[in-house]
Structure formats: C-alpha cells, structure tokens
Image (cartoon, coloured by chain):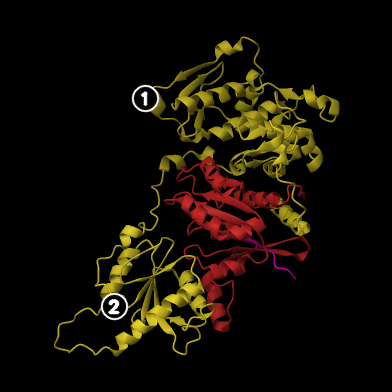
Chain colours: A yellow, B red
C-alpha cells in the first residue's frame, strides 16, 4: 500500500498545461481516488509541478518551471512514454496507483530539500540540486513529445465543395417513390416476380460510370467520360467527380436504358494536366462514392443488380457513410443486419419486415460502391456471427429512435 | 430507476460538446458551472468536468448524454461514466496530426465497454481535411476486429449526430423499429 494515502499533510501540486476543466478533474481526483494525498495549489505555493506533456506548449512550460522553481520535482503526464532527466513520468490514462507511487518517490526528496541549509546570502544564487540525481540537462521534451499534435493546414478549396459535405437526405416511404420513380412492369407484392426484378447496370449510365471510376483508379489519373449527355470528370486521387448538372437532370439520365449500339457514344479519355487543373465551380464537385450511390438508386428504382442471387446470403464489408448519402427507407436497419450477419436479400425482407424494393435498392447502392459481397463459400455463412439477442432495454432504444427520427 | 446514458468521447476539439448540444433537449451543462456547484456542496460527483445533456423521451424517461473530458485521460472517471451506458459515440477530429492514434487510444481505453455494448464513430472536420478518408478508417479498424459505423459528421448538424446515434442503436439491434 502506498504510504502517501490519507496523509495529514498533503502535498501541494501546481498544475500546468491543463485547462480549467482538466484542472478541476485533477483536483477532484487527488481528493477522491488519491485519498487526499495531494491538493492543487498555486504555482508559487506548490511543492511539486505537474505538467500535461501532451499540451501544445509543454516544452516551453517545462523550461519555464525549471527556471522558476529549480529543484522542484516535476511530474509529466503523457500518452507517450517519456524519459526526461529530473522529472517523474506518469503514463496516461492516469491511475491513482501511479500518482501515489510517484508521490511516494517524491516525498523523501522534498524532506531532504527541507533539511538542506539555506545558501549564504552573499553567495550568488545557484540552482538547487535536481530531485533525481543527474545534473540539470537540457530538456528533451521536444524530442519525445510531438509539438502537441499540430493540426493539419486547413484546405479552403475543400470547404467550398459544399455538395461533398452536405448532410444526408433521408427518404421515408412516401419520399421514396417520389424520389425514385416507379418501375411499372414489376409487382413487388408478387413473390413470383421478385427473382426477375433485376436490372443490368451495363445498360445504364451507372455501368459506364462504374467502369470509368475503376479505370481512373487503376490509371491513377483524371479522366473524362463523354456521352450523349454532359461530360463527367473523374478525379480518382481526390475521390471526386465533377458534373455540370443538378440531381433532377442526373436522375432522368440515370433511368434511361441504352439501346444496343449506344456504347459507341461513350468515350473515356485522359485529361491533360491543364484540363485537369482547370477552374470548375467548386459546388459541383461530388464525392465519387456518393455520386455512384445515388446513381445506383435512380437506376435500381427498387430492383436488384443482375447477377446477384437474392436467395443466397449477402453481407456488407462495412457500413456505408450514411451521413453523406441518400438514405433509402430502412437502409440503416438493413445495413446493421448485413454487417453482422450474411443474409439472403429475400430473407432480409422477412427478418426485418421490409418491402423487397427497399432491400433491393439498398443492396444495389452498396453493390455499386463495392461494399456488398455475396457469400461464395459455405464458410462465409458458417463463420457469420449469430443474430444478436434482443437487448433487454429494447423499449428504451425504440423510444430513443422515435425521438431521433421524429425530431 | 436506471440511468441510461450514451457516452460521447474523443480528443479535444472533436466536437463532443457540440454534438451533445445538437441533440440535447436542454442546453448542455457547462462543466465549470457544475464544478462550482459541486465544490460548494463539497460533494464529489461524476458530472464534474464532463459535458452533459439530456433527451426527454416519451413516457417521461430520459437518456443522458455524457461527454468525457478530452485532453486528460482519467480512467477512474471513465469507469464511473460508462456504468449504465448503452453505447459509445467516438468522435475523431480529422485535422489532428494522427487521428488513427487517437482512435486506437480510445478504442483501447473503452474496449470492454465497446465489447459489452456498441460503438459508432463520427469523423469531424472532413471539410477542412479530407484525409484520411472514411475508407481509411475502416481499413484501420480491421486491426481491431470490429466493423462499427463510421460516418463523416458535422457536429453542428443535428441530422448528422442523429444518424450517428441511430446507427449505434441499430448496431445493438438491427430489428429495432419505431
């Protein structure tokens, strides 16, 4: 057990490099978990200095404290392991045991310093001996501690690309039809028709964009996709596309199935550096994935992409970045299920009680951006995590959800 | 009566206070004010030095929103804080020098809580710094063997914060419906 605990004479510690909140927390911590072994004091009354070595000006503070109170024990707190002469180190997360352990080491040093005779008045002021043993060394804090996590330079051009950073559009059931339009030749209520409720992306603008994005990525250079419509510029390095059209126009074009032979009107060409760097309206840049995502939604209109077997399990490699995507009805529930457990699209409808077109449109979008996979092997199903049990506080979770969605 | 909480954590400047403010029904309790009150009462409290908000739910229930102190890492406080928590929202500031290091720290620190409950990650300031990408975060997360939702978030946007919390809830139970 630490001797320091419950002492009648708590150490006085000055805190440096901590904001008022952190200082208050430390004060409470010393009082509570550290059982009053120390109290927070002003710098000129303290016996010990404690510095947050992850602070932006930690090195400066350390030098200042060494100059202002030579010989006073210094405790450094840091995420990094520090070995600095004449200091005591505590690695974050801070624990009471660590603090008490360090205070136990400091106690005898303070006692020894108290018993030391004061230097004669005539003698020129000399720094007191350091608490540990080594002579005062030049601080090496700057070597060990990063200059307080310098932030990256702000990218002002990125800020102007407003379309990339706007919040998600969440579609409810009513909005879904209005947003997507309908596919007249499929009755989604007829189970017999479901296996045929598919589309071939290659017959739509979507397929060409997917192919162009893949090529641009492989070649790692900007490309221009020309078609009978407006040119689309792809910038794989920035994961962006640029198109001089609004969503309404894009939606209309996305739904057009190309007739055989139309492919001749499509061409992909490299952008020379001057063309790539040409000034374009910043608000018309879009995130590549978000662009393909909505293109897939408008192409699917509730159908699934051809080649996908709706009776075999599919799974998501990761969650879609929902805050920057168009969110179709029940998309988050379907995502949560498919991240956890490979499930056949037809089964998703039953398990979650979701309309087939909502499942199909969502898996279309996920498939288009490459995060949906169909289980190829038995093993994919076998290793799948079991569907989690219902949480005990399900009622509460429902209430929170209602609140969030209704707010 | 049980106190249900959602915990918001992450480094300083990641937007915890702003995010809580975005969905809280009451203005978040300012830490300093709470601390003064507590000091006056001479009573230790877990609410000191944390951000706090509340959502009033149907039937009079409440969900408490707690933000951990960002700069310092006091594990005692976290232990108390996560008690009764239904999940963790981790906010990461994409303009920081090494957001992956931040992520690792918080995932390690809260690993038990995450295992017991659920996690959703919001990456803020992506309009100021678009690297690392959301895909990069997912790649790093593979090391931890978890697949939480990771969203680009503007903590000032209620919709963004709301979606992040919704994803947390659906992670707990995909079958959840209103």
Q: Is residue A256 above or below residue A36?
A: above
Which residue is farthest top?
A261
Residue at (72% x, 40% y) in the render: A382
Q: Earlier in the sequence, mark 1 or mark 2?
A: 2
Q: Secondary structure at mark 1?
A: helix
Q: CA distance from mark 1 to mark 2?
A: 61 Å
Q: x%, y% of residue A80?
A: 41, 60
Residue underneath mark 1: A274
A118 shown above or below A204? below
Q: Which percent across, then down, holds residue A371?
A: 62, 35
Image quadrant containing the N terminus of chain B: bottom right
Is there any visible trace of residue A353 in the rendered image?
no
Q: Pointer 2: what residue?
A: A69
The secondary structure type at the circle numbered 2 is loop
Is residue A297 depicted above or below A95 in this figure?
above
Q: What percent of the width, then of the height, locates residue A61? A: 32, 68
Residue A310's label in the rendered image is none
Circle 1 marks a residue in which chain? A
- Residue A171 visible, this angle: yes
Residue at 73 percent across and 68 percent down: it is: B2
Whether callout 1 and callout 2 share a subunit is answered yes
In the image, residue B2 lies in the stretch drawn in magenta? yes
Residue A174 within the magenta-colored segment of the rendering: no
Question: Which secondary structure class fits the magenta region best?
Answer: loop
Can you give x and y, in whole percent of width and height, for residue B55 in the image? 68, 61
Magenta region: which residues? B1-6
Residue at the spot 40% in from the left edge and 24% down from the top edge? A275
Question: Which is nearer the eye, A119 or A202?
Answer: A119
Q: Observer-nearest residue: A99 or A62?
A: A99
Mark 1: few/some/many CA within 10 Å (<14, 14-19, 20+) = few
């Amino acid at each position: 057990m630490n001797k320091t605990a419950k002492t009648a004479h708590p150490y006085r510690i000055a805190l440096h490099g901590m904001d008022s909140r952190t200082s208050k927390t430390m004060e409470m911590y010393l009082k509570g978990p550290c059982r009053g072994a120390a109290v927070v004091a002003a710098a000129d009354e303290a016996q010990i200095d404690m510095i947050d070595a992850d602070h932006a000006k930690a090195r400066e503070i350390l030098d200042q404290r060494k100059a202002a109170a030579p010989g006073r024990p210094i405790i450094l707190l840091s995420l990094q392991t520090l070995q600095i002469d004449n200091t005591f180190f505590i690695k974050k997360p801070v624990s009471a045991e660590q603090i008490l352990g360090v205070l136990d080491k400091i106690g005898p040093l303070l006692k020894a310093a108290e018993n030391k005779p004061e230097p004669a008045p005539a003698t020129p002021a000399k720094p007191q001996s350091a608490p540990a043993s080594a002579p005062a060394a030049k601080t090496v804090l700057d070597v060990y501690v990063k200059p307080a996590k310098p932030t990256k330079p702000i990218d002002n051009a990125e800020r102007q690309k407003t379309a990339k950073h706007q919040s998600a559009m969440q579609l409810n059931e009513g909005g879904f039809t209005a947003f997507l339009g309908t596919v007249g030749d499929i009755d989604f209520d007829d189970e017999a028709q479901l296996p045929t409720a598919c589309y071939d992306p290659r017959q739509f603008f979507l397929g060409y964009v997917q192919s162009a994005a893949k090529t641009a990525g492989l070649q790692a250079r900007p490309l221009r996709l020309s078609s009978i419509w407006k040119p689309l510029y792809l910038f794989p390095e920035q994961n962006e596309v640029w198109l001089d059209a609004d969503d309404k126009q894009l939606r209309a074009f996305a739904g057009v199935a190309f007739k055989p032979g139309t492919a001749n009107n499509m061409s992909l060409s490299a952008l020379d550096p001057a063309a790539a760097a040409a000034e374009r309206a910043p608000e018309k840049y879009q995130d590549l994935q978000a662009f393909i995502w909505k293109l897939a939604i408008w192409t699917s209109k509730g159908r699934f992409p051809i080649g996908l077997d709706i009776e075999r399990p599919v799974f998501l490699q990761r969650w879609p970045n929902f805050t920057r995507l168009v969110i179709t009805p029940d998309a988050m529930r379907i995502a949560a299920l498919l991240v956890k457990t490979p499930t056949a699209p037809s089964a998703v409808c039953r398990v979650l009680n979701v309309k087939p077109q909502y499942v199909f449109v969502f898996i279309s979008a996920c498939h288009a951006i490459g995060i949906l996979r169909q289980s190829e092997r038995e093993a994919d199903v076998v290793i799948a995590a079991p569907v989690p049990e219902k949480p005990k506080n399900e009622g509460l979770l429902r209430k929170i959800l209602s609140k969030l969605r209704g707010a | 009566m049980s106190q249900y909480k959602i915990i918001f954590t992450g480094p300083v400047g990641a937007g915890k206070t702003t995010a809580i403010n975005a969905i809280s029904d009451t203005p978040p309790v300012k830490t300093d004010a709470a601390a003064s009150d507590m000091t006056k009462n001479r009573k230790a409290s877990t609410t000191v030095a944390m951000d706090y908000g509340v959502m009033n739910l149907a039937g009079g229930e409440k969900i408490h929103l707690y933000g951990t102190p960002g700069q310092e890492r006091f594990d005692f406080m976290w232990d108390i804080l996560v008690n009764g928590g239904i999940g963790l929202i981790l906010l990461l500031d994409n303009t920081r020098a090494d957001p992956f290091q931040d992520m690792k720290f918080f995932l390690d620190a809260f690993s038990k809580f995450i295992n017991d409950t659920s996690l959703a990650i919001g990456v803020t300031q992506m309009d100021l710094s678009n690297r690392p990408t959301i895909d990069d975060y997912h790649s790093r997360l593979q090391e931890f063997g978890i697949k939480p939702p990771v969203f680009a978030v503007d903590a000032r946007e209620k919709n963004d914060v709301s979606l992040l919390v919704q994803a947390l809830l659906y992670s707990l139970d995909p079958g959840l419906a209103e």
